[in-house]
Amino acid sequence: MMHAFSIPAALEIALRAKGYRKGLFGWLRNAPWGEPGFSALVLSMFLFGWIGGVTGVTIGTEQINMLVHNTLRLPGHFHATVVSGTTLAFMGFTYYVIPLIFRKELKLKSWAKWQPYVFGTGMLLTSMGMIVSGLQGVARRNWDITFAGVVPGTVEISLAVFGIGALLAVTGGIMYVTIVLTSILTGPRLEASNLLLLTGTHNPIIDSTKLTDHQMEDKQNQPKGALVLVFAFLVWFAIYYFTNWWLLGRTWFIR
């Protein structure tokens, strides 16, 4: 919960200080969504926290784990945390490392703009397809995941979502590798002072984003929107967690 608030709050304060103060989420609408470093960060936080984190805490409950452990819900959780959240965060970080370390201009900028969305959407569908399939009883590490037709037929829909998501994620991964190799091997070498973000006009390496004390304490710059998002996250966590206890209660009837 601390990380879920502190990182979005820092973003909100910085954007509000730039003048995006309209409503609770005016700062979010005006965020640099065209920058792959930013979009990758936000998507990785969502996938890691809202999907991977919530399912992880639920799976860590011993009684619920006895129902979850040998189903596709477990790899669905790990695909949300490691393959989605962690990997996407490092992908976004790479877009700043290339100009910082290699002093190379980023190539295929239109690909870089969309790559986090393609990979993130694919991994969201992959993780959710696995989790929903696991909720219906689909096993993992078993040659017959349907247990000879014991699981409901609706599982074919969630498995299809899983497959479509995997294809999208592979496409996003190929885009990422192509962008990185093309930039490193063929990008023009420039000094740090001449390297810019995709859509910005300022150098991310040279320019400082440090705010003054006055900007930090200004009432109009306070992270009210981030606080609302954190409580929405808490509500989602509570609903998912206690729903799993309800499902467990339906499995073990007490008479």
Image (cartoon, rainbow, N blue to C red):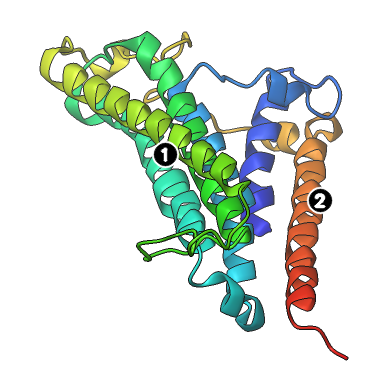
Report the residue at 48% width, 20% height from top. 35
Report the amino acid beneath label 2.
Answer: Phe
Residue tagged 2:
231
Closer to us: 118 or 18:
118
Badge number at residue 190: none
Instruction: Locate the C terminus and report the quarter of the image it occupies.
Output: bottom right
For label 1, the crowd category at 10 Å Cα-Cα, with few meaning under 14, some 14 to 19 and many 20 or more, is: many
Tell me if residue 203 can be seen.
Answer: no
Please tell me whether residue 155 is drawn above or below residue 141 in the rendered image.
Answer: above
Question: Is 17 placed left or right of 99 in the picture?
Answer: right
The residue shown at (57%, 70%) is: 68
Residue shown at the point (40%, 48%) measured from the top left: 83
What residue appears at the point 61 percent right and 48 percent down from the top-left corner? 153
Q: Tell me the distance, in whole angstroms, between the alpha carbons under discs 1 and 2.
A: 24 Å
* Residue 250 rendering spot, x and y as whole percentages: 79, 74
Count of all numbered marks drawn on residues in the image: 2
- Which badge, 1 or 2, comes first in the chain's sequence? 1
124, 145: nearer the viewer: 145
Residue 11 appears at what percent x and percent y?
63, 34
Q: Is residue 98 above or below residue 60?
A: above
Given residues 191 and 160, the one toward you in this image is 160
Residue beneath label 1, please? 88
Image coordinates for residue 152, horizontal then vertical, percent: 63, 54
Q: Is residue 156 visible?
A: yes
Q: Locate the N terminus and report the quarter of the image it occupies.
A: bottom right
Quarter holding residue 7: top right
x and y percent of residue 130 in the render? 52, 51
Question: What amino acid is labelled 1 in the image?
Answer: Leu
Label 2 neighbour load within 10 Å: few <14, some 14-19, many 20+: some
